[in-house]
Amino acid sequence: PNSKQTWHDVIKWTVGYRELYGTAYWYLVPPVSGKKPVGIYVLNPTRMQAVYSDESLTGDPIGWQYTSPTGQQVAFNAEEIMSFPYFSPFSQTLGVGPLQAATIEQDNELAAQNYVSQLYRNGAMPSGVLSSDQELTDETVERVRSDWKKTYEGQDNIGKTLILEQGLKYE
């Protein structure tokens, strides 16, 4: 396929990129004459960006932008790039590979486990409402909101004991 890669190499890299990143790309070197490309190069999918037209109804790219390992930006016509994406519900040009899907599932499972663990570790306090019989100024509301987020938001802060001020009640 090219001066640096055999067909075996091209297939190996194509399958590897597709499994890891959900998509593989080939650069088809345009022929000087005729229709058959004179070479095929496998491109790193983490360096590839689709270019779209504002009028595109199908979501097909009109070109591609590739960042070389040295940082050089290389523009390709749509016909010069062959894309091999797995199915993705999020994109027609970017696939979701088996390893990506497994990673997403694992990350979600770990986040859920961490959430439940923190919830029980900190007393399993349910969500509620802050209320006050007093009128609070906009400044006080913003300060309480900001302090609340810093102190109680996020997995590491789940179920922490509330400290209320200025007549605030947690219900």
Image (cartoon, helix red, strand yellow):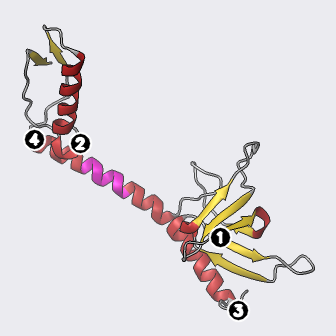
Query: In the figure, residue 139 lies in which quadrant?
Result: top left
From the image, tell me which residue sits under label 4.
122
Q: Earlier in the sequence, mark 3 or mark 2?
A: 3
Q: Secondary structure at mark 2?
A: loop
Q: Earlier in the sequence, mark 4 or mark 3?
A: 3
**Which-is-in-front pick, marks 4 and 1?**
1
- The range drawn in magenta is 106-113
Tags 4 and 1 touching, CB below 8 Å: no
**Which-is-in-front pick, marks 2 and 4?**
2
Give amino acid for label 3: Ser
Q: Quadrant of the C terminus?
A: top left
Tags 2 and 4 touching, CB below 8 Å: no
Give amino acid for label 4: Asn
Q: Secondary structure at mark 4?
A: loop
From the image, tell me which residue sits under label 3.
3
Disc 2 to disc 4, C-alpha distance:
13 Å
Give amino acid for label 2: Gly
- Density class for disc 2 (Cα within 10 Å; few <14, some 14-19, many ≥20) is few
Q: Quadrant of the N terminus?
A: bottom right
Which numbered marker is on residue 154?
2
**Which-is-in-front pick, marks 1 and 3?**
3
Tags 3 and 2 touching, CB below 8 Å: no
From the image, tell me which residue sits under label 1.
25
Q: Earlier in the sequence, mark 1 or mark 2?
A: 1
- Density class for disc 1 (Cα within 10 Å; few <14, some 14-19, many ≥20) is many
Q: Is residue 66 left or right of residue 114?
A: right
In the foreground, 39 or 138: 138
Q: Earlier in the sequence, mark 2 or mark 4?
A: 4
- Most extreme residue toward the right, as rendered? 34
User: What residue is at 70 percent from the left and 48 percent from the top?
Assistant: 59
Disc 4 to disc 1, C-alpha distance:
49 Å
User: What residue is at 90 percent from the left and 76 percent from the top?
Assistant: 35
